[in-house]
Amino acid sequence: MAWQDDAARILLANDRDGHTVPTDGLYPFQWSWDSAITALGWLTFDEARAWREGAVMFDGQWENGMLPHILFHGDSSTYFPGPDVWGGGHRIPSSAISQPPVWATTIRKMYEAAKDRSLAEASVRTLLPMLVDYHDWWYRERDPEETGLVRSFHPWESGMDNSPAWDEPLARVPPVEWEYQRRDLGHVDSSERPHKPEYDRFLYLVDFYKKNDFDPERIYKDCPYRVIDVGIVSILHRASQDLLALCGELGGGLDVAGIEAGLEGTAEAIHSLWSESDSCFLNYDDIADEPLKVRTTATILPLFGGLATAEQANRMAETIDEWLRASAFGVASTHPAEASYEPQRYWRGPVWPHINWMISLGLEKYGFDELAEDVRIATKKCIDKTGFWEYYDADSGKGCGGDEFSWPAAVALHWLDDESASCAS
Ligand code: GLC
């Protein structure tokens, strides 16, 4: 079977009546950034289904504009914490945090690539006001003091859930005091998943939002975890530019002043996070008021956001070149020279194809085409070796976490599908 058929088969198998689950069992609901990226894969063989992915996701948007990181479209006994623990939702039960806002970027890519022009135009016109509300929400509620840098209240919001960058700020969060049963360990070996003390704190935060009635002001003020995640900041920045481009073409009359101001603020403020000695931007602990020194792939995403100066971009390209080659199957999600590097454990080292895609787009944006292509080839090498897995051991290339996973399949269809690509069969 050609790998393209296999990738499409995975998306079809993970389709649940209009939304795609990341993989059966381990992740039985709709995750926001998975869904955005998966739509790119659908577009290559079923355009109507691709647009539907976004429509279903935005159906779960909160009244205040927030787009939840998980929409619980039904019950499931295979996932924890579920809707009862989160206790949030508007129209559809959901989590109470968001995820990296890559939607406007993928929607723009879909709009540019779609063959059915009238469907694409109608779909984008419907989505635009909701996208504007969503971006306004980030700038308004996650940066109420207008510093130019949005804040994040949970490691899961970063999408890089178990990244060592969050270890220190998370350690300050108290553990939950009630007993619970994790479900992830029933699907995946514990060596590839987070430890219990971290999970106890993840859950404390989930409780905290509910106890505070999801009130943004109280959460901003009192949440024991508050960081500036360079990944979110960069992805938001690129997506806001994509959103303005779409609004310029199809969104006449929408008020984009908040987004324009947000873009301006971030373009200036990002430079306070630049690390001269690391040649990348560092995440920031907003409570301890200090940079988080671990080099994770979030720290090189400002290229994707177009936030680096030409000089910074040159330095970052050197960083990425070295980082890519520091493990046999780079780009490792945590730099292999970091003490916290674990090549197989969830966000502490493994390679994630969709992150490589963003790194590569960032390099292209600044004219580093050869290196961008090297990152693409490295990604293909992972998928070639073991197929469509949640993530890949950065040293051995072994597929880890969940199998038959939607986003590597979608990334392959969208990004690796050309004559030079072979991928898994
Ligand atoms: C994990 C990942 C997160 C992803 C989710 C579903 O929680 O850390 O980024 O969205 O799985 O694939």
Image (cartoon, helix red, strand yellow):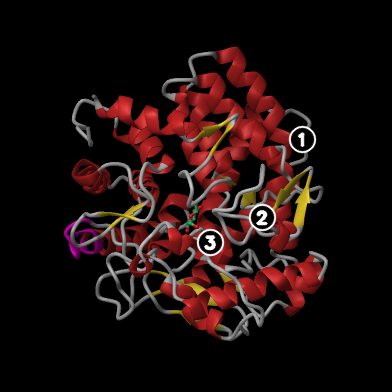
Alpha carbon separation for disc pair 1 and 3: 28 Å
Q: Secondary structure at mark 1?
A: loop
At horizontal 51% and vertical 56% (from top left) the residue drawn is 234
Above or below 223: residue 347:
above
Mark nearest the camera among 3 and 2 is 3
Q: Nearer the viewer, mark 1 or mark 3?
A: 3
Q: Mark 3 = which residue?
A: 158
Amino acid under disc 3:
Ser
Q: Which mark is residue 254?
A: 1
Label 2 crowding class (10 Å Cα cut-off): few <14, some 14-19, many 20+? Answer: many
Q: Which residues are magenta?
A: 322-329
Amino acid type of the residue tagged 2 in the rendering = Gly
* Picture quarter with the C terminus: top left
- Look at the image and say whether residue 392 sits in the magenta stretch: no
The disc placed on residue 262 is 2
Of labels 3 and 2, earlier in sequence is 3
Picture coordinates of residue 413, whole percent (x, y): 35, 31
User: Which quadrant would the N terminus be assigned to in this image?
Assistant: top left
Which residue is painted at 27% across and 66% down in the image?
Answer: 343
Is the CB of mark 3 within 8 Å of ligand 1? Answer: yes
Q: Position of residue 189 (x, y in %)?
A: 35, 63
Residue 340 spot, x, y in % from top left: 33, 78
